[in-house]
Image (spheres, rainbow, N blue to C red):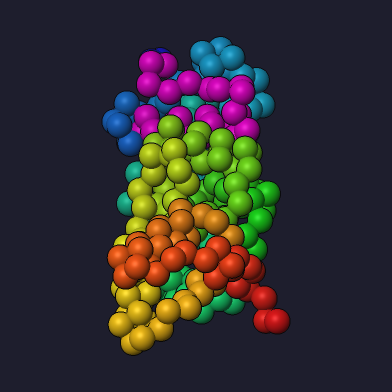
Amino acid sequence: MSTMDMMIDRDQYTPLYIQLKLLIKDKIQKGEYLKDQPIPSCKDFAKTYSVSKLTVRQAFSDLIKEGILYGVVGKGTFVADRQKTQQPMTIGVLVIDTPNLFYSTIVSGVESVLYDAGVNMILGNTNNNPEKESDYLVKLVEQGVSGFILVPTTSRDITSDKIIKDFVSRRFPIVMVDRYIEGQDIDYIGIDHEKGAYDAASYLIKQGHRNIAYITEETCTSVNARIKGYLSALAEHGIPYNKDYVIHGDLRSEE
């Protein structure tokens, strides 16, 4: 069994059996394990990756439930033909505030596309809480999601960032929307926030306004880009920056 591409990392926050699940999925995707062919035994996996047989059995059990593997009594564990098992793909969608019109619109668009493609969706609302984000990431992988569409929380913590980094290193698909995590090489979809804020501020300036406030949420990559565009517009038109005009707050509040 080749272990050159991916190993079990005991220093990661991702549970060992989930790391093993992702490792097996990766080998199937790369053609190292073929359809209807046996994969190494529980004993072999335990020895090669220095994990317990219980950890291997848990990984096998989850993958069998997901229709990726199947067992034959007395013969071992085999790679399933996903077309034969007809197990639909499921994508986890995590956003920071589902009642917010902006994010609910994103969710609606994602759901429409996934439905047309025959893909299931599990929606999670992190409430902009990095600990809840971490819990969702692990729990939804346990439930067999095939990837994530993620609006990352504004504040970050080491646990969530390490889990995401570990998933990406194991080639588990993640796409970030609206904002991204700096220092992580992850696919990202978003608008040109800097230009949007620049255009908005420039428009107000051209209408004769000089005292222009910028009200925003906590700092994140998209917010930083918008502030940069706002400041660029002020500077271009010779308007001095007033720090009191940049107001940070919780935009989810109804007060």
245 and 73: which is toward the camera: 245
Q: Is residue 123 visible?
A: no
- Check if residue 119 falls in the magenta segment: no
**Residue 141 in the image, given as x and y percentages of width and height:** 55, 46
**Residue 137 in the image, given as x and y percentages of width and height:** 57, 48
112 shown above or below 61: below
Q: Residue at x 63, y 38 (%)?
A: 159
Question: Which residue is farthest bottom?
Answer: 207
Q: Residue at x 60, y 47 (%)?
A: 156
Q: Quadrant of the N terminus?
A: top left
90 and 93: which is toward the camera: 93
**Residue 101 in the image, given as x and y percentages of width and height:** 51, 79
Question: Which residue is farthest right?
Answer: 255
**Residue 54 in the image, given as x and y percentages of width and height:** 66, 26
Q: Quadrant of residue 206?
A: bottom left
- Number of marks in the rendered image: 0
Q: Quadrant of residue 30?
A: top left
239 shown above or below 56: below
Q: Residue at x 35, y 48 (%)?
A: 187
- Check if residue 12 falls in the magenta segment: yes
Please give the range of residues in magenta: 3-28
176 and 209: which is toward the camera: 209
119 and 70: which is toward the camera: 119
Q: Residue at x 59, y 77 (%)?
A: 99
Left or right side of 137 for 109: left
Q: Is residue 190 visible?
A: yes
Q: Quadrant of the C terminus?
A: bottom right
